Amino acid sequence: MDDNSVDIIFLHHVVEHLWEVRPALTEAKRVLRQGGHVVIATPNLDSANRRKWGRWWRGYEAPRHLRLYTLSAMQDALRDTGFGIHLARCSARAAPAWDRESARASGTDNSSKLFGWWQEDRKVLRGNASLLAGNHDGDELLVVGKVI
């Protein structure tokens, strides 16, 4: 791609598959126009479900996931490669599904009943209202860097 040729780049569950994110961000910055954005969604190493499920947490996905990030680490990587931070938060969007997948991996999944998964999703979200507030406990990071 040519330098300064695109307005936005989406890295939706990509960076966790890379050994190092900075080369990818450097390339993104090269092709983005002034004021362009890179949008990153990736598992959150600080998530409540990671603490709850330990080695069974869905976000690990070894050997496919090579590196996981905290919110501050992802922001540091963006700043180190010359981006400003436009948005940085955690999302609970995937928390119910990741909780269910972690339970399945650990052998404790009890959602095999018809629509049991849906009831469990609602239970997880009700029981973790703090996840919906966008704090650091959500299973996914959503970070948007802006070319400055």
Image (tube, rainbow, N blue to C red):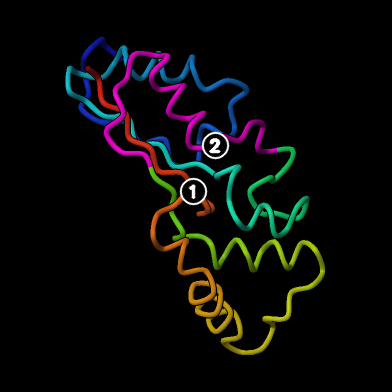
Name which residue lies at 82% across and 69% down: 107
Q: Residue furthest right?
A: 107
| Quarter assignment of residue 148 | top left
Q: Which mark is residue 70?
A: 2
How packed mark 1 is, by other alpha carbons closer than 10 Å (few <14, some 14-19, many 20 or more), is many
The location of residue 78, given as percent across then percent down, is 40, 22
Secondary structure under tag 2 reads loop
Tell which circle, 2 or 1, labels the residue nearer the N-terminal end: 2
- Seen in the picture, residue 145 relative to 4 is either above or below; the reply is below
Decide: marks 2, 1 in contact (CB < 8 A)? yes
Name which residue lies at 70% across and 59% down: 52
Q: Which residue is mark 1?
A: 136
- Seen in the picture, residue 30 relative to 87 is either above or below; the reply is above
Q: Which residues are magenta?
A: 64-88
Asked if residue 84 is among those painted magenta in the image, a careful observer would answer yes
How packed mark 2 is, by other alpha carbons closer than 10 Å (few <14, some 14-19, many 20 or more), is some
Q: Residue furthest left?
A: 34
Separation (CA) of disc 2 from disc 1: 9 Å
Asked if residue 5 is among those painted magenta in the image, a careful observer would answer no
Name which residue lies at 49% across and 48% down: 136
Residue flagged by tag 2: what amino acid is it?
Thr
Name which residue lies at 55% across and 44% down: 44
The quarter of the rendered structure image containing the N terminus is top left
The location of residue 147, given as percent across then percent down, is 25, 20
Query: Is 7 placed left or right of 30 in the picture?
Result: left
Query: Is 143 placed left or right of 36 in the picture?
Result: right
Tally of numbered discs:
2
Residue flagged by tag 1: what amino acid is it?
His
